[in-house]
Amino acid sequence: MRILIIVWLIGALWGGSFDRNCVPCHRKEGVSPRLTFMNALLIYSGEHNMKAGLKYFLRHPSRETSVMGEEYFRTHRLKAPLTLPERELDEALDEYWERYKVIGRLR
C-alpha cells in the first residue's frame, strides 16, 4: 500500500509529458492550452488529424500552420522547432487530447 501511495505522489508531483514539456511554456507565454486545443479542434476536427497537425507544427512551426490567428502574432513570437524525442511528444499529445477533449463530456 505504501508503495502505491509513493508512486502516486511521485506521479502527481512530476506530472506527465504534457505537464512537464508544454504547460510551463504556455504559462510563460500566457496562452491557454484549452484555447489552443479548441482552435486546433475547429481546424482539424478529430483526434487523429489534430495530433498529426499539432505534431507537424511543433516540429516545423510557421504562421501558416499555426492554429492561432494572425492577431496572436502581434503579441507573441513563433516558437523554435520542438526537439522532444518522438515518444515523449506522442505521450504529451495523447495527454493533451485526454485532458481537453469534449467527446463524452457533453451533457
Image (spheres, rainbow, N blue to C red):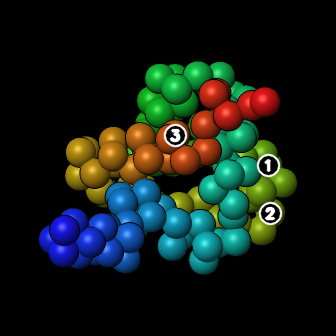
- CB under 8 Å between discs 3 and 1: no
Q: What's the residue at 74%, 31% (across, down)?
A: 106
| Residue 8 falls in image quadrant | bottom left
Q: CA–CA distance between discs 2 and 3? A: 27 Å
SS class of the residue under badge 1? Answer: helix
**Number of marks present in the image shown:** 3
SS class of the residue under badge 2? Answer: helix
Lower sequence index among marks 2 and 3: 2
Neighbor class of circle 3 (other Cα within 10 Å; few <14, some 14-19, many 20+) is: some
Disc 2 marks a residue whose amino acid type is: Arg
- CB under 8 Å between discs 2 and 1: yes
User: Is residue 90 left or right of 23 when viewed as pictured?
Assistant: left
Residue that lies at the very extreme toward the right in this rendered image = 71
Q: What's the residue at 23%, 52% (across, down)?
A: 85
Q: Which mark is residue 47?
A: none
| Residue designated by label 2 | 74
Disc 1 marks a residue whose amino acid type is: Glu
Question: Percent position (x, y) of residue 107?
Answer: 78, 30
Q: Which mark is residue 97?
A: 3
| Residue 77 falls in image quadrant | bottom right
Q: Can you say which quadrant of the picture contains the N terminus?
A: bottom left
Residue that lies at the very extreme toward the front in this rendered image = 1
- Please say if 8 is above or below 36: below
Question: Percent position (x, y) of residue 62?
Answer: 57, 46
Nearest the viewer among 34 and 69 is 34
Neighbor class of circle 1 (other Cα within 10 Å; few <14, some 14-19, many 20+) is: few
Q: CA–CA distance between discs 2 and 1? A: 7 Å
Lower sequence index among marks 3 and 1: 1
Q: Which mark is residue 70?
A: 1
Disc 3 marks a residue whose amino acid type is: Trp
- Please say if 107 is above or below 72: above
User: Is residue 92 left or right of 99 when viewed as pictured?
Assistant: left
